Amino acid sequence: MDQAVLWILERFTFEASLWSVKVEGLLWSSIDVFLVFSVLKIFGLARARAGARPIIFRYLFLWVSAAMTPFLFLAKHHGAFWILDCTIISIHLALLASSVLLDGRRALVMLQAIRRLYTRASTAPEER
């Protein structure tokens, strides 16, 4: 076991470390964009159901963060990578937090309505 760890440590260079961090960051940020987009869609549906205006600016900020994501691969050193990655993650967290604060109640009302429809549809006719 010790020999295997030593072998890895001898061959894991700065360039290999930076490359693996870039790939991981690119994948995670891409997944985050998809997940935040999905959550924004739910909040957008809740707003539409309540008759409120669409959440255009939140989608704009998500698009900006998605456009920043490929630049993670262009970072020349760990510091630049982490600053960019933290910026992207901060945008995602700000979008999620603002959505919960501004539209959390609407989303809960919509989800409760969906749950009521589902429970009515799943009960047998003789139980109604």
Image: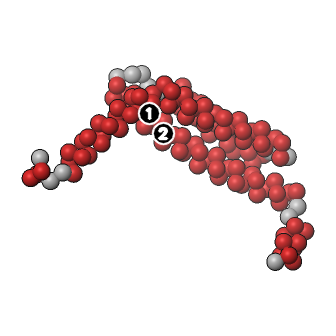
- Which of the pair 74/110 is nearer the observer? 110
The quadrant of the picture occupied by the N terminus is bottom right
Question: Which residue is most to the left?
Answer: 126
Contact flag, marks 2 and 1 (Cβ < 8 Å): yes
Looking at the image, residue 30 lies above or below residue 10: above
Q: Residue at x 40, y 33 (%)?
A: 107
Quadrant for residue 65, please give it: top right
Q: Residue at x 75, y 51 (%)?
A: 22
Quadrant for residue 2, please give it: bottom right
Task: Identify the secondary structure beneath mark 2.
Answer: helix
- Residue 67 in view in this figure: no
What's the residue type where badge 2 is placed? Val
Q: Is residue 34 left or right of residue 12?
A: left
Counting every numbered tag in the picture gives 2
Q: Which mark is residue 39?
A: 2
Q: Residue at x 21, y 51 (%)?
A: 122
- Which of the pair 23/92 is nearer the observer? 92
What's the residue type where badge 1 is placed? Phe
Q: Is residue 10 left or right of residue 18?
A: right
Task: Identify the secondary structure beneath mark 1.
Answer: helix
- Residue 24 in view in this figure: yes
- Which of the pair 5/55 is nearer the observer? 5
- Residue 77 in the image: x percent, y percent? 85, 46
Q: Is residue 121 left or right of residue 111?
A: left
Q: Which mark is residue 43?
A: 1
- Residue 120 in the image: x percent, y percent? 20, 45
Looking at the image, residue 114 lies above or below residue 18: above
Query: Gap in Å between the C-alphas at discs 2 and 1?
Result: 6 Å
- Residue 102 in the image: x percent, y percent? 48, 25
